[in-house]
Image: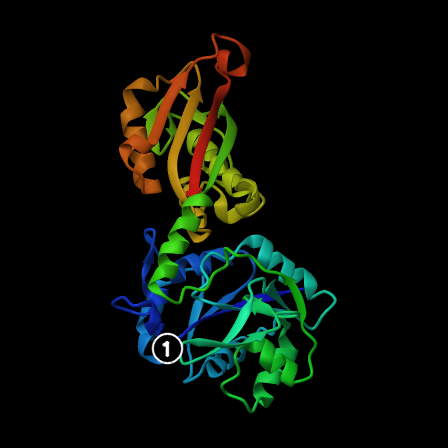
Amino acid sequence: MTTAVIIVAAGRGLRAGGPEPKQWQMLRGQRVIDRTIAAFAGVGPIVVVLAPNEMQRAETLTGCRAVAGGATRAASVRAGLEALESEAPDLVLIHDAARPLVSHTVIGDVIGALAANPAAAPALAVTDALWKGESGEVSGVQDRTGLFRAQTPQGFHYSAILAAHRAASDAEAADDVAIARAAGLSVATTRGDERNLKITTPEDFTRAEQLLESQMDIRTGNGFDVHKFGPGDHVWLCGVKVPHTHALVGHSDADVGMHAVTDAIYGALGRGDIGQHFPPSDPQWKGAASHIFLEHACALARELGYRITHADCTLVCEFPKVGPHAAAMKAEMARIMGLGPDQVSVKATTSEKLGFTGRGEGIAALATATLVRP
């Protein structure tokens, strides 16, 4: 089943303070809205609903498309739903941009519940005592039995929630669950997460920062590649053309070092290897420059909210000599990856005349990449 995502970001968020709406403010070095979009990367196409007077900001967003919202939240959600009509996904998740810490588990649980239900949403049981109050005094007690705190993403079968929004008469509905229930749809609850807070006040920014500190995601990936020698007068190694008596044979330019680093990044992301993204059976990649593959892996890491902090590549060969070119290789790899020179390492070793590299039949490369999602 296909799933699409609508992220509602058309509100003003005045209670959060700051010079601009909360979704555009920074949270530990990244805008709130960018963190929210990254949380849904890989789920399906993402539509972000912006205030009409902020549509120019759409060009600063990646991994999504933007549409203009309406005067109410319900109107904005309907605009997002209408924008998806041409592709008509089976399922749709509707999420508040102000919840940037939503986890893959929360998202996955909602999608899973939609297999047996027309709608589902995460919720947290109310555990605190509830009071009624008037004029600054407690005027009564509210029974908390059966009460839940609602969260997003709220998930629906697309056609059902689109019809519900089109038929809705209450433009001020609290959320999409209210609109779904008004249309007669049953809504299953899934387990919410205390970390999935909605940023509403300045204090929420502080709490979100503290939560981010405690849930930093650090990934390490390994890459390994081999190419044999063939006819030619140079080899490409880590983006540098090195004169040699032979060339390396491969479907692309056979840059064994760059291939290993690229696979290390894909590995850290859990996204397969070069062959899956750029199949050798596809003629368009015949003779392609390997920086295309590395740039794609780096862009994918950024799209998923990760920052590459380090890459280490070891070339294993008897010849050509790597030492005279190592600095240039390091600089070129850093340039392509958008890293500082101290974040990239390129070095070489021999196999002491052992194996295919020792016999001068080809070159091998090993690489490690470290990625961090704050």
Instruction: Indicate left or right for 50 with 187 as reference.
Output: left
Q: Which residue is label 1 attached to?
A: 51
Can residue 86 be seen in this snapshot?
no
Relative to 346, say whether 57 is above or below: below
Q: Nearer the viewer, residue 268 or 316?
A: 268
Residue 7 on image: x %, y %: 47, 68
Q: Quadrant of the N terminus?
A: bottom right
Disc 1 marks a residue whose amino acid type is Ala
Give the crowd class for mark 1: few <14, some 14-19, many >=20 residues within 10 Å: many
Residue 282, image x and y in percent?
55, 47
The one of 245 and 349 positioned closer to us in this rendering: 349
Instruction: Name the side, left or right, on which 257 lies relative to 43.
Output: left
| Count of numbered marks | 1
> Quick check: 275 left or right of 188?
left
- Report x, y in % for residue 226: 52, 26
Q: Residue at x 53, y 38 (%)?
A: 267
Look at the numbered disc 1 and give the secondary structure of its residue: loop
